[in-house]
Image (cartoon, coloured by chain):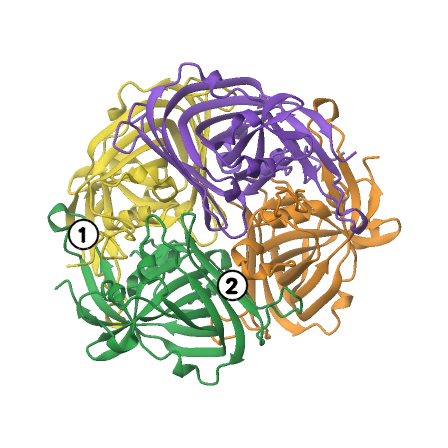
Chain colours: A yellow, B green, C purple, D orange
């Protein structure tokens, strides 16, 4: 009997990139609110999603330093299970409900790619960094305090895809006023057999389900964000026309399930 | 209309990890023949494959420096499309036919992961190196000539998974006597919805189809191979009990199709 | 006029790996006390240092997640200036004073190599990871609390060089009882001109000077440490015969100066 | 007795980044002739070098895939000793003699950094790629033939620093008409002791000495080269105003010595 949630399956399951949930996550995050061209957002939406006309092209660009653990103390193997991520969430509507949709996402870890594809996150490899906040006081510590600067960046294949910078101004009393939309993804797995290449084997709209969500230590402030045009990528099509607030926060949750909203392959 | 063979799909298809075939490949390869414990090989085979009793546990460990191109001159963007790979092929039988099956494979590139998963190669990220043969004469050149030494290695997450070394002895007149089995893979994509986690969305035995296969400049010689036990992997279960010949060769082919041998999800 | 503390020097100094001090650092650290073969430690000491006979081969293996900044808000460019480090400090004696000496050190950043070599740290490139403590509560958070597990590892060129694990037991009231020796290094820069290859251009014993040293949130607990033998390295010669306590702490300091203890090139 | 040409020195010398010469190299190279602003080149020259007024700002941008070996069959450990490099050579004059000078250079290997600094190459870490020529015929093979396209790039810290592309037109009968100037470097090692930070410990103009130089299979053709402005680097100050011919070649040599042309520290 071969074991593993993802490939490769083996008798022990030890080699599998991912084992069965629960999957537990904790992170430090930088998120930048911005507005892109609404038509460019609309052009990225899969069947079943519509542009949120009230959003005016609103989006968030996120950078996350993640720690993952499953059922086997994976957090003590940080070379395998700690990772960094950057993604953009654009505002859209599913079946009358305002949601966020993820068209672009980058991580630096293969287990994160495997979990992400199973959920519907279109992950690619990237190199992601964000300024960290350290406890030992120093000009290098970046404390969670008014005036602290944080930078963040994502690159892939030696091209810088996004660069951000925020300056903390004040604690955010009620983060649910900022971060309150459910996240919808497109779970997609193609077919290579010649007769079926234009039809996916799996093509579903999915809804991210997060247990025990915790959002802590949220600070807001001023922000900068650049998404330059580079060869071989087209994320710049939703580059910022205008940048809003920047946020720095901690976030944790667990994943044990996924809701399938719509089967587009059927 | 969103384009791309794989995620992420976009209006231009430029961001997609993979676009529609044809996919063209050329490579330099080191391959080491060896024998593992037959029961350990049998334990890795998916439903539909049987141990090849005549093989006595025969397997090949491959290291490949690949160059990929599609329809857009991708070979001129080597930061994105050049990659290195290491994998093991174990001898098995499908429906009475002797075949090779790939239980473990590592690459250093995300487009290669996406193409591999679509075919059935259970790819994980790794760091792969092999000695190259350079044209300019030097003690560092490793020419294709009797006595030349080549080394190769694969590591993941800072653990060395395999190390090999060969010494060239003579040209191989008829490579088809060495490399002649078709390759079978398991195309596998899981479900995360709680009620279906133990059933895959896609679970197929597939057969690799290679157009315009070219195998050139094949040299054989003596070989060493080590597959040590490391935490978080279990490839060592098919470590060599005995090592055979080592080979150094060039190989090219194109991929435009995939044959589905058996649907194990149905 | 060309500018820069290190190469490359340019009219603006912008390309230089390192600019003039002050250099400010803050970090999260895991440190493992252990005992190696005293003769193996003695064999690594440069001229001017002697084995500390009272130490019985005592050493500390450190893992550090660093954030660096200079005079130009470098901390907002984490892709360039955030880095990870692993090193061993062995106990020795200089001129009658008990000191720590650094024979092996690995970092994942070139600016850190350049600063290190200028001080006398014999830095090589490595891939370093340690479990982090996140604020958002989760099984993945590794809080600073009794019972938390932390892991750490360092690898170079795909070989795992050291793996550690600690379990927190209690806060350490007085860290100065644990970490109290000055650090001595060998600042060394060779000559390639044929007649002088066996004599270094620079060969000095140096003393690390740290301004505004802060050590915070020190926890102690049980520890494990492995330093395996790998091809191409000889750090295993001071592998642990016995492992003592493990520590997790925050540390910050600034560097503006270096004391030259002894000129061995003269 | 501690051994090693570079740090770290150990009783066996096994850990040293570099051991005593001879150092043997073989490579595949792409080189792009171009012209930069002469004043920008002049501003980069160290004391002792002058702008070559006849060159009009001529420079070459090189990409190299290197294989290194020393006295211990290092070429069979490609994870440690194979590396990639990109650098620019600008035309200048030393003591009346036309030379090339290297103001910027990037490599992906620490042993290459250590050897380079000892010679006077101001190496930083980068990620370097060039299209390779494979023997097995394929659209992906990039043969050495009229019409073949080759691309190359260098990035550091997730910023693309240069991108090039050439198209082969014809073999170059006499490469010595193209590549014929000696290479001069600045060997530079700073002091950190506060009183001496503005004076280097080592500051020499050096001349590269190459034994058994072989230049083979030289092809010329049309070329493109971009050196964009990025934060934290200033190589763009010598970006191309005009691009000349592109070359693809093999090159090998050995290093056993270095000539010191001038001591600027004295």
| Cα separation between marks 1 and 2 | 40 Å
The extreme bottom residue here reads B173
User: Is A218 on the left or on the right of B159, as rendered?
Assistant: left
Question: In the image shown, does C158 or B240 lie closer to the viewer?
Answer: B240
Q: Position of residue B135 (x, y in %)?
A: 62, 70
Q: Position of residue A58 (x, y in %)?
A: 32, 35
Instruction: Name the residue beneath numbered marker 2.
Output: B151
Q: Is residue B195 above or below residue D129?
A: above
- Few, some or many residues within 10 Å of mark 1 (<14, 14–19, 20+): many
Q: Is residue D188 above or below residue A200?
A: above
Element on which disc 1 rests: loop
Chain letter of mark 1 equals: B
Question: In the image shown, does D42 or C204 lie closer to the viewer?
Answer: C204
Q: Earlier in the sequence, mark 1 or mark 2?
A: 2
Figure quadrant of the N terminus of chain C: top right
Q: Is residue C179 visible?
A: yes
Instruction: Name the residue beneath numbered marker 1.
Output: B191
Q: Quadrant of residue A222?
A: top left
Q: Quadrant of residue A219?
A: top left
Q: Residue at x 49, y 50 (%)?
A: C230
User: Is A220 on the left or on the right of D139, as rendered?
Assistant: left
Q: Residue at x 56, y 71 (%)?
A: D148
Tell me the mark number nearer the camera, choosing from 1 and 2.
2
Name the mark on residue D230. none
């Amino acid at each position: 009997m071969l074991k593993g949630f993802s490939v490769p399956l083996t008798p022990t399951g030890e080699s599998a990139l991912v084992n069965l949930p629960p999957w537990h996550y904790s992170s430090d995050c930088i998120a930048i609110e911005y507005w892109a061209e609404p038509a460019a957002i609309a052009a990225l939406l899969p069947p079943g999603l519509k542009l949120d006309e009230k959003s005016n092209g609103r989006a968030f660009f996120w950078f996350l330093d993640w720690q993952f653990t499953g059922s086997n103390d994976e957090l003590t193997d940080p070379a395998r299970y700690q990772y960094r991520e950057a993604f953009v969430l654009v505002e859209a509507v599913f079946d009358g409900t305002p949601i966020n949709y993820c068209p672009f996402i980058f991580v630096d870890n293969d287990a994160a790619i495997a979990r992400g594809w199973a959920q519907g996150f279109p992950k690619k490899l990237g190199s992601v960094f964000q300024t960290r906040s350290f406890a030992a006081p120093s000009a290098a510590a970046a404390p969670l305090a008014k005036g602290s600067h944080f930078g963040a960046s994502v690159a892939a294949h030696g091209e810088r895809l996004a660069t951000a910078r925020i300056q903390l101004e004040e604690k955010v009393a009620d983060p649910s006023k900022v971060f309150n939309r459910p996240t919808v993804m497109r779970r997609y797995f193609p077919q290579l057999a010649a007769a079926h290449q234009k039809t996916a084997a799996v093509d579903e709209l999915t809804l991210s389900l997060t247990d025990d969500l915790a959002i802590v230590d949220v600070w807001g402030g001023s922000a900068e964000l650049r998404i330059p045009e580079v060869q071989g990528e087209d994320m710049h099509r939703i580059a910022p026309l205008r940048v809003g607030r920047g946020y720095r926060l901690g976030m944790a949750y667990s994943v044990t399930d996924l809701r399938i909203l719509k089967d587009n392959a059927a």
